């Protein structure tokens, strides 16, 4: 077991030991996953509630959905299990205020893949976790890495607070875009990260990949507002090889690869190496397909040593497997880790820059 986890208790064990009734806060796919894990561990769910403005007399998972205000009036004391993601300040603050009145558990269930990020999981992957920790280039990264793992294991929001860093610091101190950069955005969505890059500095060229049809239309619309010939857009999936895959329908920002039998939209998949782009910055936020996308970038990473911005929160193993994968492709990198405001432990990103940068 990594030493920094010695005094950390699994979220699911904490919930099972809690003698107060447990109420799920929120509904949706994340909440469904949490309920299934609670059932697996024999943890009883007393009911479901939502913020007052979202309650319309409906039910979820066999429970009538209560208003928070009504629940606090009728139940003397209870604990809260957060069942949705919160990534903007006002909602984050609302959860923080709730945590002053009740015990709040924020379970970690992977967006993609199986298993849970528990003490036992960390024990099995101790060597990889400690290797990546030793690779990190500054104390802030070590702090983020340790506290995000503590948060994922414990479900205790205080560790997310300790890990959160301002996004502006990433661009100002780590990535430092400049006018000579060739920026490749894999999982470009509607151009949101492109906007952030251009707010810091103009760049030489942008190559943006987005597989979801609806998101791609938004991306193209945004691209039309940029200077002529600055950006090239591709409606495809960043993958390990050139092939055809199937993409989920109507999933918006969380669109992802599905089996053909799930009636997804057929989309061209490309290894980005085949575009032969002299990239100097690459971002990947490809909803659990980061491992495959990096395989399709091996030549680009080995030959050009671009600065990398990699999401490491979609799968349990991403926190340690993706840094080690990059290191195996090109060992001449410095590694930083940052976490932007979000619970559960989403928006945790790895930043790799050449040793001489």
Image (cartoon, helix red, strand yellow):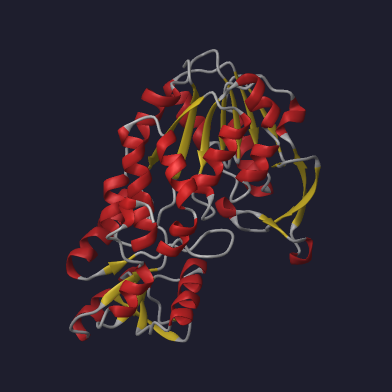
- Residue 88 in sight in this render: no
Choose between 294 and 186: the one closer to the eye. Answer: 294
Q: Position of residue 48 (x, y in %)?
A: 37, 79
The furthest residue to the right = 243
Choose between 119 and 30: the one closer to the eye. Answer: 119
Choose between 340 and 123: the one closer to the eye. Answer: 123
Q: Residue at x 27, y 75 (%)?
A: 79
Q: Quadrant of residue 38?
A: bottom left
| Number of numbered discs on residues | 0
Q: Quadrant of residue 185?
A: top right
Picture layout, residue 67 above or below residue 354: below
Q: Position of residue 182 (x, y in %)?
A: 59, 20
Q: Quadrant of the N terminus?
A: bottom left
Picture layout, residue 54 above or below residue 135: below
Q: Residue at x 56, y 33 (%)?
A: 327
Q: Position of residue 81 (x, y in %)?
A: 35, 71
- Residue 24 in sight in this render: yes
Q: Position of residue 266 (x, y in %)?
A: 78, 52
Picture layout, residue 95 above or below residue 137: below
Q: Is residue 4 left or right of residue 101?
A: right
Q: Is residue 82 left or right of residue 234?
A: left
Q: Residue at x 21, y 61 (%)?
A: 97
Q: Is residue 131 left or right of residue 18?
A: right
Q: Residue at x 41, y 59 (%)?
A: 85
The furthest residue to the top = 180
């Amino acid at each position: 077991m990594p030493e920094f986890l010695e005094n950390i208790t699994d979220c699911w064990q904490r919930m099972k030991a809690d003698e107060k009734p447990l109420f799920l806060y929120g509904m949706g796919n994340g909440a469904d996953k949490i309920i299934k894990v609670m059932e697996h561990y024999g943890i009883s769910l007393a009911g479901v509630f939502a913020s007052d403005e979202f309650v319309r007399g409906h039910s979820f998972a066999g429970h009538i959905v209560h208003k928070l205000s009504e629940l606090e009036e009728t139940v003397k004391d209870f604990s809260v299990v957060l069942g949705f993601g919160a990534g903007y300040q006002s909602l984050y603050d609302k959860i923080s205020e709730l945590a002053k009145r009740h015990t709040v558990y924020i379970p970690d269930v992977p967006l993609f893949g199986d298993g849970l990020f528990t003490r036992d999981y960390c024990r099995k992957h101790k060597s990889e976790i400690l290797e990546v920790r030793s690779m990190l280039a500054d104390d802030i990264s070590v702090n983020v890495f340790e506290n995000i793992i503590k948060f994922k294991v414990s479900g205790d929001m205080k560790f997310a607070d300790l890990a959160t860093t301002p996004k502006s610091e990433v661009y100002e101190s780590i990535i430092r875009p400049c006018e000579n950069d060739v920026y490749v955005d894999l999982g470009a969505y509607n151009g949101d990260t492109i906007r952030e890059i251009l707010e810091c500095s103009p760049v030489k060229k942008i190559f943006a990949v987005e597989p979801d049809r609806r998101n791609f239309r938004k991306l193209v619309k945004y691209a039309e507002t940029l200077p002529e010939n600055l950006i090239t857009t591709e409606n495809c999936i960043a993958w390990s090889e050139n092939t055809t895959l199937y993409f989920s329908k109507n999933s918006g920002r969380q669109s992802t690869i599905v089996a053909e039998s799930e009636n997804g939209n057929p989309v061209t998949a490309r290894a980005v190496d085949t575009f032969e782009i002299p990239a100097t910055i690459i971002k990947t936020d490809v909803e659990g397909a980061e491992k495959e996308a990096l395989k399709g970038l091996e030549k680009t990473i080995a030959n050009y040593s671009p600065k990398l911005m990699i999401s490491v929160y979609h799968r349990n193993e991403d926190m340690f497997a993706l840094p080690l994968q990059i290191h195996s492709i090109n060992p001449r990198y410095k590694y930083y880790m940052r976490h932007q405001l979000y619970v559960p432990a989403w928006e945790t990103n790895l930043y790799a820059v050449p040793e001489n940068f």
